[in-house]
Image: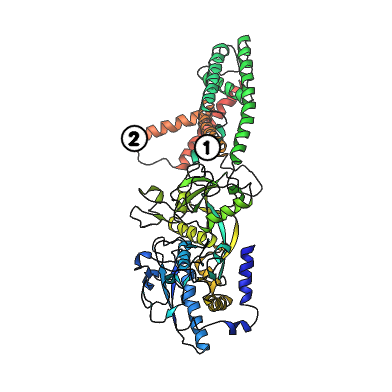
Amino acid sequence: RATWCVLGAAILTFCQTPMVRAQVPLDNLCGKHFRIMTHASPPFINVDTGLCINQRCPPEAFGRDGGLSYRFIMEDVQPQLVRMCSDAGLPPTVELSWYVAASDKTSAQGAINTVCNGDFAANQIPLLINGTYCPSGYNNASAANDKLYLGPSPAGTCTFVNDPSCVSPGPDMVIGAVHVTVERLSQLQFSAPYMNVQQTIVKRPEEGKSIADSFLNIFLAFDGLLWLAIIIECILAWLMLLLVESSVNEDIMPGLNALYDTWYWVFSTLLGGADKAPVTVGGKIIFCAHTFFSVVIIATYTGGVAAFLTQQASVPVVTGFSSLSSGAFSVVVRGPSWDSLAIPPDYLGDFAGGNSNPDVTPSLQFKYLQVVMRASQSASFTIFTTQRLESRRRDDTALTTDRDTNPCNIDGATLGAYDLVKCGSDGPEHPDTMIFDTPAVIYELNLRKNRTGVCGLVTVGKEFNPTGFGIGFPFNSNLHLAWSEAMLNQIGVGKIDSYIDEYQISQNDNQCKWQEPDGGLAMTIKEMSGLFTLTALGLLAACLHSLYERRLYRKAHMTDDEALIEIEKRALAKGKEDDGEDGVESDDEAEEAKKEEKKKKEEEAKKKKEE
């Protein structure tokens, strides 16, 4: 709430009356050169830091697509600033050059600390002076003279780090995926926010069962040893009934047919529908014992399979932020490692591991978890920490996920937050989720989906912790006023909205979103596929065997007339072969022969009847 109050007040400052325009100072803007500190953070800042020389990044480092924030500043805000200077009768020149931090080139906090400290040193930890962090150490009388911010340099000067022509030793501002927070408002002066951002949770999609698992699902209520015992009991009952009943029970088919007929009797009894009754005392005892066994097994299996399938459907899953605050599921964020068993610990929560170290600057997400735990004693997060979001190879080059490259299988790779979640498996040694900015998450997951064809990660739950992206300036520079007016002017004509549509980073563009099942727990056809498969196989076997039986039955019950016709056909065919005839007797001749033979048979039958 405090953050939104501050942001709202900042916006109101530039939207109340036209008189504000006259109060915006431009003397420190027009005809000046600004050094911008940034950090690699797609899709907002797309920069190849390998092309940056002595921390300065030329236009080539940003390629054809420098990212949303870069393009917004260079293509929209800078021209607007030039127009403002021209309208005021001042030099219509506003030069911008871009720099990255000396060590961590992907951290927003590292870029902020560089501006805050007033130099380009590799040490990005905020200076601590008089018990407070910067801006006490920057643009303050108590700071060292070489740290004072004296304003931007004249246009055409200050072209590299430590250039003696620079008016101030450090950067003039920080631009990127920089959240405006209450803590940072005590470090820098911020412009009005140019984009609203919230946090979202990323997790692995629930792994679907394999075909084999789905097929065997209905059998998993009993273990393998119990199924073996049931089969052995059925075999014993079958052999004993064969021995006792097959020779005296007229319901049992004779000969070898007694084998499968008795087995059917045993199996149908197991399923609750015996097809015959025993006639001997011994057979009745066997039948009663097998029937009792079958009733108990069926009742136990019915209850067991229901409980088993219900338990499978009710396995807890991550559904939102509340799933993490209980500690039941772990989360990975960018931040330092620590000993959670120390007294007192450096940070709250249960530290579970990761690939970070104690010197990594805490991220916005890490700090948010700490704030939640301080505000609520019932909240306790299981936290993994990492140094970066992206994965890196052994030689520290970027590791991109595509159809041919899986970071999980690269030896020596240092996994970032996304791949720590993706490559993990259920268990305490791997993070279940991660938290990061929603637009950046949607951009990354869509990019991975387009490269691989599948959603290896999905977003889940509602967004939370709203903030805004803004530009940070040294305190008392008054630069934030003119820059805010230029940004608000361009936001008002829909520039940011058009960029959001172009980069496809709204929730409507999210291709990898977890869908919570509607209607509560429900069985699906996949979970019962084994039952349908067995039933289909049984029906298919029955159809094939019935066709075979029908053919045998037809031969066994052929009438005398049909048999005689069949014999004559065979004799006729044999005669043609003996005579060397090539053709086949015409249909009329064959029909005539049949009629003569039929007439002869009818006369013989009539004569027999008269006799």
Q: CA distance from mark 2 to mark 1?
A: 62 Å
* Amino acid at circle 2: Asp
Label 1 neighbour load within 10 Å: few <14, some 14-19, many 20+: many
209 relative to 402, above or below: above
Image point (34%, 33%), residue name: 578
Label 2's element?
A: helix
Asked if one can make out residue 217 in the rendered structure from this viewpoint, the answer is yes
Please name whichever residue, 411 or 204, is drawn nearer the observer in this view of the structure: 411
Mark identifier at residue 421: none
Q: Residue furthest top?
A: 281
Q: Position of residue 128 (x, y in %)?
A: 49, 61
Label 2 neighbour load within 10 Å: few <14, some 14-19, many 20+: few
Image point (49%, 38%), residue name: 212
Image point (46%, 38%), residue name: 590
Q: Which residue is mark 1?
A: 215
Q: Where, quadrant-wise, is the N terminus in this rendering?
A: bottom right
328 relative to 438, above or below: above
